[in-house]
Image (tube, helix red, strand yellow):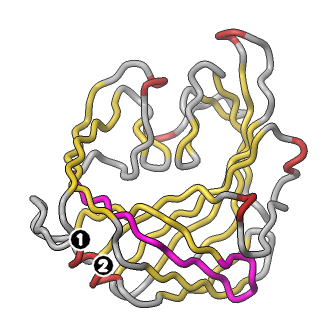
Amino acid sequence: MIARRRLTCSWARAVMASLALFGCVDDAGSGPQGGQIGGVYTEGGRCEDQKQPIGETDVSPLGFSASEVIASIAGERTAPLTWANGGSTTVTVLVGAPTAVRFVESTRVEDSDPSGVEPAFAVDCADHLEIDVPLSFTTADGAFAESLEVTLRATEAGAARFHHELDLAALEGSYEVTEIDPSAYKEVSVYLRGTISESAVTGEIDGTAESHPSGSGPDATVSATLFEVATF
């Protein structure tokens, strides 16, 4: 059974990132739980990042280099993947050589206006490395056969995480959105998120389906459905 959740948001204050909607309430009238969704602060704060380009082999202020991260996650990683619609397959992930590296000094900044919140990858504002890499993401059933350009986020040398919005019009695999009816919505987005470690890869694919705005001006609202695609 596919898990879905419908949210209603202030159109002027809705921000969508990492499957997160800010200034929203669900159909039961409650807002997001725990103050954050998908690693993005939603109550009174945001991450302010200062980014500094560094070399692939440069030891960062974190005590490790991008080359150490890549060495620890090099080689193919495979995992069982379960579709929300039913059925399963095997996913294979392979990270390529870095094309750019940045040391990111991240500080939490108090912000009383949720509309100013920007996407953040982690549940806190930890310093980290950003490593731009090519990433191969394929499934044995042919649903995905993608060559992507993603940004890894590493707070330690032995693992890295990534978040990527898939271009549904440019997929090389056979996947099409069937978890919801795309024609019933204004916009549909699907996201790939994962963690690669020295011995494994885990993650999920899920999406948002945004309805057309109801009303106009600052009082307008928009509804969005969050839906699951797969986990691995």
Q: From what the image shows, is residue 91 above or below residue 18? A: below
Q: Tell me the crowding category of disc 2: few under 14, some 14 to 19, or many 20 or more residues within 10 angstroms, Cα based.
A: many
**Residue flagged by tag 1: what amino acid is it?**
Ala
Residue shown at the point (54%, 32%) measured from the top left: 22
Q: Which residues are magenta?
A: 127-145
Is 187 displayed left or right of 195 in the figure? Answer: right
Quarter of the image that includes the N terminus? bottom right
The image quadrant that residue 8 belongs to is: top right
Badge 1 density bin: few <14, some 14–19, many ≥20, Cα 10 Å: many
Is there a contact, CB below 8 Å, between mark 1 and mark 2? yes
Q: Quadrant of residue 107?
A: top left
In the rendered image, residue 121, in percent from the top left (x then y), is placed at 40, 51
State the SS at label 1: helix
Residue 94, x across and y down, in percent: 48, 83
Residue at x 58%, y 38% (from the top left corner): 16
Q: Is residue 15 above or below residue 51?
A: above
Of the residues shown, which amino acid type is indicated by label 2? Ile
Helix, strand or loop at label 2? It is helix
Q: Please name the residue that numbered disc 2 is placed on.
A: 70
Residue bearing mark 1: 66
Q: Is residue 132 magenta?
A: yes
Q: CA distance from mark 1 to mark 2?
A: 6 Å
* Quarter of the image that includes the C terminus: bottom right
Please give the name of the residue rendered at 74% of the width and 77% of the height, measured from the top-left corner. 143
Quarter of the view holding residue 102: bottom left
* Left or right for 7, reference 112: right
